[in-house]
Amino acid sequence: MSKDKGFVTEITPQGEDFSRWYIDVIKKAELMDYSPVRGCIVFRPDGYELWENMQRELDRRFKDTGHRNAYFPLFIPESFFTKEKEHVEGFNPELPFVTEAGGEQLEEKLAIRPTSETMFGHMYAKWINSYRDLPLLINQWANVVRWEKRTLPFLRTSEFLWQEGHTAHEDEADARRETMQMLDVYTDFVENVLAIPVIKGQKTPSERFAGAVDTFSIEAMMKDGRAVQAGTSHYLGTKFAVAFDIKYLDRENTQQYCHTTSWGVSTRLIGALIMVHGDDRGLVMPPKVAPTQVVMIPIGPPKTREVVIGKTDELYAQLKAAGIRVRVDDRADVSPGWKFNEYEMRGIPIRLELGPRDLENGQCVLVSRVTGEKKSVSLDNLVAEVEALLEQIHADMYERALSFQQENFFSVDTLDEYKTAMEEKRGFALAGWCGSDACEQQVKEETGATSRNIPFEPAERKSKCLVCGEPAKHTVVFARAY
């Protein structure tokens, strides 16, 4: 047993087995449990509240940019998927179907929603008649099902929760503006709320969304060096408009096809924040989405318990009134040391300790989950001190994640160099690519890495393809991914 493992039993150190560490942490912290259905999980209250907090932050950003929420059916007729060839080919292996209901065979199989471009397309064809109906900007919060063969809680499950935005526009320029705007919204959310730095760029043709003209993504680096696609935004051109007859009468009284977009993030962001920020003591929750931001622990001998608990309740009310998510653990039958370790494992950003001597001095102790630093603060200024520390913890988490990303981002010129580097390093590689599918596939076959995206702002521009040595059309980020 390692020294760190002694703090919290039953958690495998990251350096020993990162995947095992991940499973240990999410189960011990009670974020999820396995369901009796293969590949599906149960979100326990802390895990679901984490998602609710993410929803709230994202939903506000969507509405601020003019989008409205609606809800579309879970079941989609099989014929819808045959209307857009690339789309159906991309999803066929993962599609579950309902073939019988009420004891009778259905006339047409119904797919359980893997994504909703086809259903939105069908309805948009009914709702859009004129340029006055555009742009149409709708988002839905929903569950989707993709029958995964290999699953990992939060990151890849057969059923997961997400949001999917679908919009229709008069022309390509407006649709592309929407596509990039939503990529920026995701970047802002992931970096400024989840404290995760990302690489923003365009997907290569082999990695783009089935049926899209262009796909753009933000890619995040986990602590084992692997990538998680943290969000995508797609320009769909007129492909779905043609397939579903989404037309409008333009300003010259001519029928035109709409240009459409789609974009989404899912509960895999929960997995990402755990893998980016967690350590051998357990979770480290970003303050802005943490289910509990502050845990208050009154300490001291039984004779002082009543007065300490009384003051704790008073301070709890102040923090609660300020909108801080706070809880009190005043159990007398559990030691303070046990509580300290338990809430560290659960990743609560701030621990507040209050004892009789603190009361005499008109102060309490705040402890940061990120740095472990203890700070005595005046009770008269407690709310402001807590708010400031929450902001500092977010900044500390982002800087740590950014430093890790930069330390594990390397540059290669040839495939052999990349293979050698992967034996010694973990992380993302920047390399040149000629644009050939064959060269991209060879990288995947020989390294297990895929192209993550063509970054908008690479640290350097590569001149030669890492596989064939021909002039590079693009500078690409390669990495093994979840």
Image (cartoon, rainbow, N blue to C red):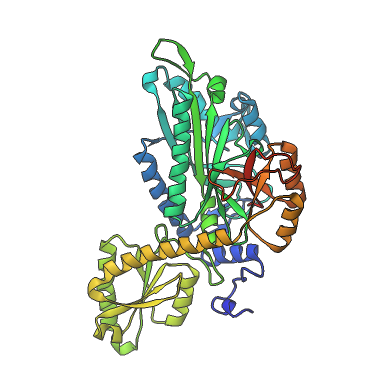
Can residue 31 be seen in the rendering of this structure?
A: no
Counting the numbered discs, the total is 0
Name the residue furthest left. Answer: 380
Corner quadrant of residue 26: bottom right
Which residue is at a point 71% across and 63% down the rendered structure image?
Answer: 424
Q: In the drawing, does residue 114 fall left or right of residue 70?
A: right
Q: Position of residue 273 (x, y in %)?
A: 51, 58
234 or 172, nearer to the observer: 172
Which residue is at a point 54% across and 23% down the rendered structure image?
Answer: 238
Q: Position of residue 353 (x, y in %)?
A: 35, 78
Q: Position of residue 118 (x, y in %)?
A: 55, 28
**In the image, is residue 376 above or below residue 108?**
below
Can residue 345 be seen in the rendering of this structure?
A: yes
Q: Position of residue 426 (x, y in %)?
A: 65, 60
Which residue is at a point 29% across and 83% down the rendered structure image?
Answer: 358
Q: In the drawing, does residue 466 fall left or right of residue 194?
A: right
174 or 474, nearer to the observer: 474
